[in-house]
């Protein structure tokens, strides 16, 4: 695709419900990142994949958060038993790898805005 | 771990004036410093970036400077226009092992308002 695509764009969940957020990265991008952006704040790192391998999940706030990228392309961020503090925009970003192994520019999706009532 | 501080949190300038936003970082291993512009309800978009092997980079009205010794970097926008109004985020990317994973640690953001 032309850019990073995320769905749904908006999700309202009742406290305690499970939600799943999908990210379609730019075709061929090896690296995929999930960030959480609370209102008026900068994005905060959640987790990082290189192909299908989850190399860093140090930013996931609790064991209610789970991310996967089983075939090294599409990724899903799952939040179980949602709480009000989970309300935020969840941003996905993808990038290619430069020669030498460094990551290139991160391209962000429009985000999925989660509101937990 | 890395920590990025950004100042000011809000900045208001007259059209045509310059705007400067400053960031400091804590991890001397960080080697990649991008700046993102985010309009309300939109995705963050890269406007300029710098790697630690250079001290300054310029792209038309936008420039970034990096002082590795002091661990700070700045965004300079000259001849500001109303369409420059947005939230600007700086970020730092730690260098881990032999490469940079691209994981970004963001500052808190600066809301820039350019008055016509």
Image (spheres, rainbow, N blue to C red):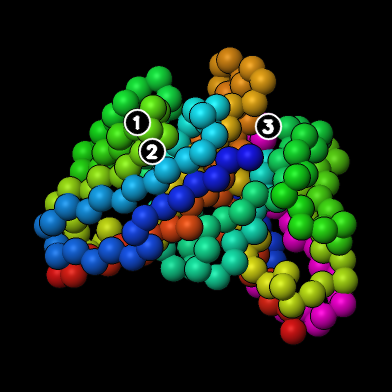
State the CA–CA distance, disc 3 to disc 2: 30 Å
State the CA–CA distance, disc 1 to disc 2: 5 Å
Rendered location of residue B43, percent (x, y): 50, 57
Q: Dot 1: what SS? A: strand
| Residue wearing tag 1 | B67
Question: Do pointers 1 and 2 mark residues of a single chain?
Answer: yes
Looking at the image, which residue is at 87% across and 57% down?
A: A63
| Residue wearing tag 2 | B72
- Image height of A117 relative to A52, above or below: below
- Name the side, left or right, on which A35 lies relative to B35: right
Which callout, 1 or 3, points to the residue nearer the camera?
Answer: 1
| Residue wearing tag 3 | A30
Rendered location of residue A46, percent (x, y): 70, 50
Q: Residues within 10 Å of mark 3 (few under 14, many from 20)?
A: some
Instruction: Classify the position of the N terminus of chain B by image quarter.
Output: top right
Question: Do pointers 1 and 3 mark residues of a single chain?
Answer: no
Q: Given contact means CB atoms under 8 Å apart, are the residues at marks 1 and 2 in contact?
A: yes
Q: Is residue B9 visible?
A: yes
Badge 1: chain ID: B
Q: Dot 2: what SS? A: strand
- Name the side, left or right, on which A93 lies relative to A19: left
- Image height of B110 relative to B60, above or below: below
Rendered location of residue B73, percent (x, y): 36, 39
Looking at the image, which residue is at 31% across and 44% down?
A: B75
Residue situated furthest left in the rendering = B16
Q: Dot 3: what SS? A: loop
Rendered location of residue B48, percent (x, y): 37, 39
Badge 3: chain ID: A
State the CA–CA distance, disc 1 to disc 3: 31 Å
Q: Is residue A24 visible?
A: no
Front residue of B26/B100: it is B26
The region drawn magenta spans: A10-31
């Amino acid at each position: 695709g032309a850019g990073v695509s995320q769905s749904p764009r908006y999700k309202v969940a009742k406290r305690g419900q499970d939600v799943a957020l999908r990210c379609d990265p730019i075709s061929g991008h090896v690296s995929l990142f999930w960030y959480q952006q609370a209102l008026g704040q900068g994005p905060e790192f959640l987790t990082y994949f290189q192909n299908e391998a989850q190399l860093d999940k140090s930013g996931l706030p609790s064991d209610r958060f789970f991310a996967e990228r089983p075939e090294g392309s599409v990724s899903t961020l799952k939040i179980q038993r949602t709480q009000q503090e989970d309300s935020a925009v969840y941003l996905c970003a993808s990038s290619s790898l430069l020669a030498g192994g460094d990551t290139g520019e991160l391209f962000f999706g429009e985000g999925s805005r989660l509101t937990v009532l | 771990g890395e920590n990025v501080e950004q100042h000011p949190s809000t900045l208001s300038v007259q059209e045509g004036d310059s705007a400067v936003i400053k960031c400091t970082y804590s991890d001397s291993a960080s080697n990649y410093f991008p700046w993102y512009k985010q309009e309300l309800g939109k995705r963050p978009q890269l406007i300029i970036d710098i790697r630690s092997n250079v001290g300054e980079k310029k792209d038309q009205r936008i420039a970034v400077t990096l002082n590795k010794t002091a661990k700070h970097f700045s965004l300079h926008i000259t001849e500001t226009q109303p369409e420059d109004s947005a939230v600007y985020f700086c970020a730092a990317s730690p260098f881990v092992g032999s490469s940079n994973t691209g994981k970004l640690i963001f500052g808190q953001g600066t809301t820039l308002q350019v008055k016509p």
